[in-house]
Structure formats: C-alpha cells, structure tokens
Amino acid sequence: MVDPQRVGGVVLCGGQSERMGMSKAWLDYGGEHFLTRIVKTIGQVVTPIVVAARSGQDLPSLNDDVRVVYDSVSRGGPLVGLLAAFDVLADKCDAVFVCACDQPLITPQFVKKFVDLLEDNKAILIEHDGRLHPLTAVYRLSARPLLAEMVAGEELRAKDFAARCGALTLRSSIFSEVDPKLMSLWNINDRQAYERLRLHLGL
C-alpha cells in the first residue's frame, strides 16, 4: 500500500475546449463549477493538488492551498501541463493522481482505488471498453526525466508517455466495486455530453 499522504493530485484544464465552446472549468454542476468540484473531490484523498492551466486562462476561485501552474508552450497538450505540475510537486510527494477538469462525476472512492493499487508500480493505467485512459491515472514522480525528455522532443502523446514509463494497465472491472458504471471516467467534451449530464442530474 502507498502512503496516501505522499500522493498528490493534478487536475489538467489547459485544453482549448473548442467542442464545448467555453472553458469546461467553468461549467456548472448543481451550482458548483466543474473545476472546483473536482479539486474538492480528489482532495479528499490526495494532497497537495496542482491545477495545470494554459497561459492566461481564467479559472474559478480555488482554495489557497491549491497551486495553479501555467503551460510554458502554447497548445502543447496535457503533457506540458503535467510536467509543470511534476516540477511543483517534486519535493512534496512520491506520486500523483491525474485527471481532467471535465470529469465531474469522479468520486473519492475511485481515486483511492488508484492510490491503493499503485503499490510498487511505476504507474497505474485503466482500460475501459478497449480504450486506454492515460490522463486518469497515477504516475510516480520518478518519471519526471522521461516526461521532460518527451516534452523537449515534442513527443506529446499521453499514451506514449504511459507506455514508456512502464505503466501497469488494469481492466476497468477492477474498479467496479467502487464505481459500478465507471461514471468517474465520463468526460464532458461537448454540448451534447453536457446536456446528457444535466439530464442525469435532473437539472
């Protein structure tokens, strides 16, 4: 078992949100912004938390103990934000749970399951319906040199980073006891998905 006090959190919110037409960090979830809700949720399990945003991005208010970092490269993708977060957390924890700001249904139990499963592995990755989820995962900060090398070389595919750092890929069924319908993985990428979420919430 990994000491949860040595696992931090990273929320990626630097995407352009072109399909949504607005910043997904500001989307409403029952009176709460997506980003605020997700930070609060994962903060029940991991600490400290870093939010990785694009340069100049406006964000909802966050607690003072949440650090915000900004991409050094425009449109560099999530690995650029992840590297910035790694640099902030390097002396504060051994590993990080990573998710995106468009996963409002993520639960503390789901996050804790990732942390518990890390053990001596370099990273934990989930596969669901034949799709890998490298941005809902746990990574050890020892992967920072590889991440820096990939960003410097403009190798920016998250799946490639997960593979090269030796991530253990687990079937989603392992998480069914804590999230039977895997709603924690639901990415709200566009207006249609957002309307489905609103229907799900009865709004």
Image (spheres, rainbow, N blue to C red):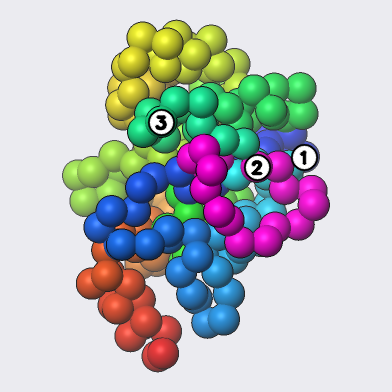
Q: Find the magenta span and give its range.
A: 52-68
**Amino acid type shown at disc 2:** Val
**Amino acid type shown at disc 1:** Gln
Q: Is residue 137 above or below residue 64?
A: above
Residue furthest bottom in the image: 202
Label 2: few (<14), some or many (≥20) within 10 Å?
some
Residue 58 on the magenta span? yes
Residue 5 is tagged as 1
174, 115: nearer the viewer: 115
**Amino acid type shown at disc 3:** Ser
Residue that numbered label 2 is attached to: 68
Label 1: few (<14), some or many (≥20) within 10 Å?
some
Q: Is residue 167 above or below residue 191?
A: above
| Cα gap from disc 3 to disc 2, whole angstroms | 16 Å
Residue that numbered label 3 is attached to: 74
Q: Secondary structure at mark 3?
A: loop
Indicate left or right for 112 with 92 as reference.
left
